[in-house]
Image: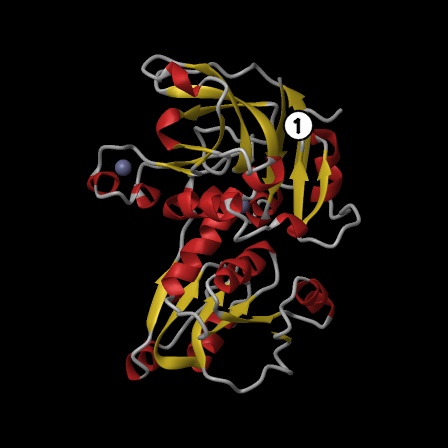
Amino acid sequence: MRALVFTGPGKASVQEVPAPRAEQGQVVVDVERAGICGTDMELFGGEMSYYGTGQSSYPLRPGHEWCGTVTAVGDGVDESWLGVRVTGDTMVGCGECPRCRAGRHWVCAARHELGITDGLPGALATQLAFPAAYLHRLPPPVDATLGAMVEPGGNALRCVRAAAVEAHERLLVFGTGTIGLLVAFFARARGVQVHLIGRSETDLALPRALGFAHAWTRSTLPGLPWDGIVDATTGDEIPALALDLIEPGRRIVYIGLSVPPSLIDTRALVLKDVTAVGILGASDGLPGAIEAYADGTVDPRPLVAATVSLDEIAEVLAGNRPPGAGPKIHVDPSKG
Ligand SMILES: [Zn+2]
Ligand SMILES: [Zn+2]
């Protein structure tokens, strides 16, 4: 089968690799659609911190935002999975440690992250072997595009829950990339008044086209009380700015990662009685994201600029994005 392989920093090729087998507890999935995100760009470029910690190494097979159909099951897997359309959790825990047993497998010290850490090759391929215990069923309204947007949607939904804003309260979202816009969608679906901040006026065109009239740059941001703030940027100065801006007693949610350390003054956190929350991955947000896409409460399809073939990914990674307004690029591995 064919798979995208990162062979070294800044080097990618589509290779013919052995087709995966469904080992004990696993299924094989024919990949219908997969997304490329910022994490993939960091894995490609070599900036990802996991290379330094030894959790990831080249050659690496990326892809963790995906959907497809189960075509084989291994020992110990219910045959009723055959033919089912699915997506899966990026975070695959050991299943046995106290964190896994407490239902927080996404912070398991022995976890694999699909297509990110070593040991579980990713979904930017025609096929994928994946543990059945971490699959999620996709109901029929969730098409290929929606299916491959479940993973980023789960991240965004976890951010919105963590921000703990009620209907009619005001949420400020830093960042107009996929996660920032998905946070905006999920918050709007709850009746929250959403405000977005982008780096430039140009970045605000898409949010405005999606109906987010409260779209600002740093210089135009009005001085309003913010009942919740989500930082979905890579700016190292944004976490401290968020702490300056947040209403006392409320919550800041951090999902973006900067390359240099992004420091906050905990004295301000104490004196404002603010709760800061970090979000790693989509895990317990996946079922809610699937539900919101299935019932149409959230429709993230306008975020997808284009769907390309495996062979066309190299161009995208090199910075030559196909035309299209959205921040997300999808891949159809069956496309020639
Ligand atoms: Zn991603
Ligand atoms: Zn574990």
The residue shown at (76%, 50%) is 324
Image quadrant in which you'd find residue 229 = bottom left
Q: Is residue 100 above or below residue 193?
A: above
Amino acid type indicated by mark 1 = Pro
Q: Residue at x 64, y 48 (%)?
A: 301
Q: Is residue 285 above or below residue 172?
A: above
Image location (x, y in percent) of residue 166: 39, 70
The residue that appears at 72% across and 72% down in the rendered structure is 201
| Quadrant location, ligand no. 2 | top left
Question: In the depicted view, which residue is nearer to us: 291 or 51?
Answer: 291
Query: Which residue appears at 63% of the width and 29% of the height?
Result: 4
Residue 175 pos. (x, y %): 58, 65
Looking at the rendered image, the quarter that the N terminus falls into is: top right
- Numbered marks: total: 1
Rendering colour mode: secondary structure
Residue placed under numbered mark 1 in the picture: 333
Q: Position of residue 283 (x, y in %)?
A: 39, 44
Question: Which one is nearer the viewer's eye here, 2 or 249?
Answer: 249
Check the image and report above or below for 295 versus 68.
Answer: below
Instruction: Examine the rendered structure and indicate whether residue 211 appears above or below residue 104.
Output: below
